[in-house]
Image: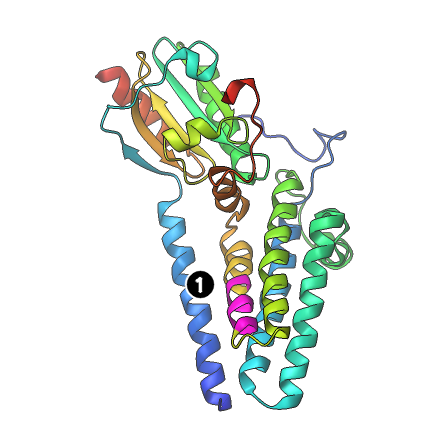
């Protein structure tokens, strides 16, 4: 494979790219916390159930933070910058913050709906929503799976997103 | 649930996600040879097609691997004569997304000089895969 010059940190000083390992680091924390939530919810005891709902609510809030404030302002991002990034080599390339921000939005919708349904008394709503969010976070962190690559397209195909400009007429 | 059952459930969930990830990883960047029935005209993409082949990339703004695929395809198009790289944002062209049944971004369609779809690469495109498809079209 011929490696042509790749944009590096130094090459793109004006661009507001992010280190792609930041969101993956955040997703791994999210995955562990979601797994903890599921474990607590399955335990059945009252104390554990309450703890599961509290932890899950915190996760919903964190997803909302990432989705609405942007992935750059997410608390995990600050943790990554302070603790992890200094120990790593410079990233080979920087990434657009839009894809991980979109993924945070997807996480917010899944966990938010799960929380609302759980509080409305729907059985297993919390465990199912937390499991779906766990799979997404795990794939993101371990396999660098890009959630926006498929979900976004589903929304376009459903007619929810899409600019009906002259080109599409 | 007993603690043992909880641990088993969580382990099963992790195993399930791992299998999903491995399946996705295998599919990512794979080529599918097309039947040769679909054709794209320069009117569809609002621009000229390449005289020997066209790499038609479907992208979106929320897609990180689209950027690396863009780089791979522009490099190859720049280094070969008659190969054009055309990138389409799925947000702008939901019509083409439905017509070609695009399920993920990036998806790259490899077109021959007449605009007939010869191959389809789902996911991040690797340079050697793209070059092999271009060679196949050139040899046809």
Relative to A103, is B27 on the left or the right? left
Q: Residue at x 55, y 18 (%)?
A: A166
User: x, y percentage for residue A58?
Assistant: 71, 68
Quadrant in which the C terminus of chain B appears = top left
User: x, y percentage for residue B77?
Assistant: 45, 17
Image height of B44 relative to B13, above or below: above
Relative to A22, is B10 on the left or the right? left
User: x, y percentage for residue A49?
Assistant: 62, 83
Relative to A77, is A152 on the left or the right? left
Residue B83, located in which quarter of the rendered image? top left
Q: Residue at x 45, y 78 (%)?
A: B9
Mark 1 lies on residue: B17
The colouring scheme, among rainbow, by chain, secondary structure or one colour, is rainbow
Image height of A55 relative to A89, above or below: below
Label 1 crowd bin: few (<14), some (14–19), many (20+), radius 10 Å = many
| Residue B5 magenta-highlighted | no
The chain holding disc 1 is: B
Relative to A6, is B114 on the left or the right? left
Front residue of B5/B68: it is: B5
> Magenta span: helix, strand or loop, mainly?
helix
Image height of A132 relative to B62, above or below: below
User: x, y percentage for residue A125?
Assistant: 54, 71
Q: Which residues are magenta?
A: A125-133
Q: Is residue B127 visible?
A: no
Give the SS element for disc 1.
helix
Q: Residue at x 36, y 18 (%)?
A: B40
Residue lying furthest front: A120
């Amino acid at each position: 494979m011929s490696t042509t010059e790749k944009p590096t940190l130094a090459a793109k000083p004006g661009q507001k790219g992010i280190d792609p390992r930041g969101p993956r680091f955040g997703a791994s924390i999210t995955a562990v916390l979601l797994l903890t939530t599921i474990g607590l919810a399955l335990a059945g005891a009252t104390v554990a159930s309450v703890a599961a709902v509290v932890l899950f609510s915190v996760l919903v809030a964190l997803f909302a933070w990432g989705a609405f404030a942007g992935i750059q302002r997410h608390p995990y991002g600050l943790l990554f910058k302070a603790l992890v990034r200094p120990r790593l080599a410079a990233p080979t390339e920087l990434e657009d913050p839009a894809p991980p921000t979109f993924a945070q939005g997807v996480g917010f919708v899944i966990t938010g709906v799960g929380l609302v349904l759980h509080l409305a008394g729907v059985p297993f709503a919390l465990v199912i929503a937390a499991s779906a969010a766990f799979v997404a976070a795990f794939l993101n962190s371990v396999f660098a799976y890009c959630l926006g690559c498929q979900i976004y397209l589903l929304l376009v195909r459903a007619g929810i997103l899409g600019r009906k400009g002259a080109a599409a007429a | 649930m007993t603690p043992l059952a909880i641990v088993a459930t969580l382990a099963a969930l992790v195993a399930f996600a791992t299998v999903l990830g491995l399946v996705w990883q295998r599919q990512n960047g794979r080529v599918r040879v097309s039947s040769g029935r679909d054709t794209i005209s320069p009117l569809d993409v609002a621009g000229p097609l390449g005289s020997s082949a066209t790499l038609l990339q479907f992208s979106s703004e929320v897609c990180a691997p689209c950027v690396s695929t863009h780089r791979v395809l522009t490099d190859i198009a720049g280094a070969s004569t008659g190969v054009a790289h055309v990138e389409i944002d799925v947000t702008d062209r939901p019509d083409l997304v439905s017509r070609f049944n695009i399920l993920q971004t990036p998806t790259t369609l490899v077109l021959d000089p007449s605009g007939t779809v010869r191959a389809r690469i789902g996911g991040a495109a690797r340079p050697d895969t793209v070059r092999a498809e271009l060679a196949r079209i050139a040899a046809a």
